[in-house]
Image (cartoon, rainbow, N blue to C red):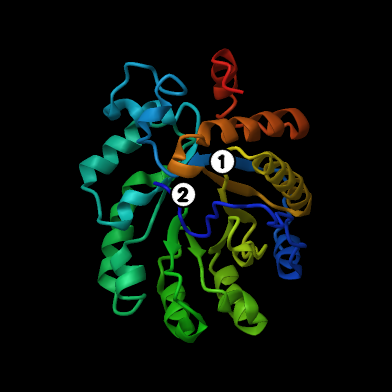
Amino acid sequence: MCMDFGRLKDIAGVDFALPEEDPYSQMVLRNHPNFVGNFDFRLGAPAWSCAAWKGKIYPEKSNPATFLHYYAEHFDTIELNSTHYGIPKLETLSKWKSSVGDDFRFCPKMLQNVSHRKRLNNVQSEVDEFTDTMRVFEHKLGYTWLQMPPDFDIQERKSLFKFLEKYPIDIPLALELRHDSWFNDKEVLDELSSIMTERSQAMIITDVAGRRDVLHMRLTTPAIIIRFVGNELSPTDYSRVDDWLKRLARFKAQGLQEVYFFAHQPEDILCPEIGNHIGRKSEIEYNWKFTYPILREKVEQRALF
């Protein structure tokens, strides 16, 4: 699932530095101190259907029906884009659920009819059907991903606020906003953040070359969801990841409890390579353990670096 939003062919001159930490985010973390030290770092990609991963993280002779099984040996979360276009059958979701381990988390994308066509208005029945169906994942359900269209601005904030307040509180929700008005109006952003914090709903942070405004650093829960868009393993991809790990280490010290890091690359072909770098750096420099280091040995054996 190639992500085109904010992608640039020429990244020369782009300032990839992470913004300063947001005082609201610091307040949220202070109010959720992590006394027991729990910290889950989940790493994922946009899809498991990439046939180009054969010989890389999938066996050479594997078929698409087995891709999810092998994907889950290396990643422990997924952006489930297919649910954006329709609700899968229960037996399909059950099959997916049985193909992954207990630590895996599915992050289904909200129906486009809800987010893009109806723009959150008069959608209660569709939301109920969607959330009731996704409950089949049980503990393997991560954050539902509500992505709003690029032209959805603060003039429609009442629709968004109402939607968030009615959304089932037992289904974790993450919101991705793309119009710059949300990040240029502090009063509206704070009002939105307050609603989301009260309901433990997370704000998605997107790191992409052509839209640095959506790299907003606003946390509304002690969880962070990052959509990282690389540039074909440019040297900046690696330095950007390193900067993120340093930032996450600081957030962890302040109380951050959970990370969902989704690694995007053009056509998704190079997701395992950047994921491998994240896994290696996390393990060696920060002692963060997760499923992904299994890939390290396989990638190095095939001299992909």
User: Which type of secondary structure does the marked residue at label 1 adopt?
Assistant: strand
Q: Which secondary structure lies at badge 2?
A: loop
- Amino acid type of the residue that numbered disc 1 sits on in the rendered structure: Arg
Q: Disc 2 marks which amino acid?
A: Gly
Name the quadrant containing residue 239.
top right
- CB atoms at circles 1 and 2 under 8 Å apart? yes
Q: Position of residue 137 (x, y in %)?
A: 36, 45
Q: Nearer the viewer, mark 1 or mark 2?
A: 1
N-terminal of the pair, mark 1 or mark 2, is: 1
Circle 1 residue:
42
User: Is residue 133 positioned above or below 184 on the image?
Assistant: above
Quarter in which the C terminus is drawn: top right
**Placement of 217 over or under 95, stated as above or below:** below
Q: Is residue 97 left or right of residue 252?
A: left
Left or right: residue 97 versus residue 150 is left
Residue 230's spot in the image, x, y percent? 57, 45
Residue occupying the point 72% across, 51% down: 34
- Where residue 81 appears, x then y in whole percent? 36, 50
183 over 254 or under it: above or below? below
Q: Crowding near pointer 2: few (<14 within 10 Å), some, many (20+)?
A: many
Q: Residues within 10 Å of mark 1 (few under 14, many from 20)?
A: many
Q: Residue furthest top?
A: 301
Spot occupied by residue 53 in the image (x, y as percentages of width and height): 42, 27
**264 and 31: which is toward the camera:** 264
Residue at 57% across, 21% down: 304
Residue 273 position by quadrant: top right
Where does label 2 land, which residue?
A: 142
Residue displayed at 77% across by 54% down: 254
Q: Viewed as shown, does residue 51 lie left or right of 278?
A: left
All told, the count of numbered labels is 2
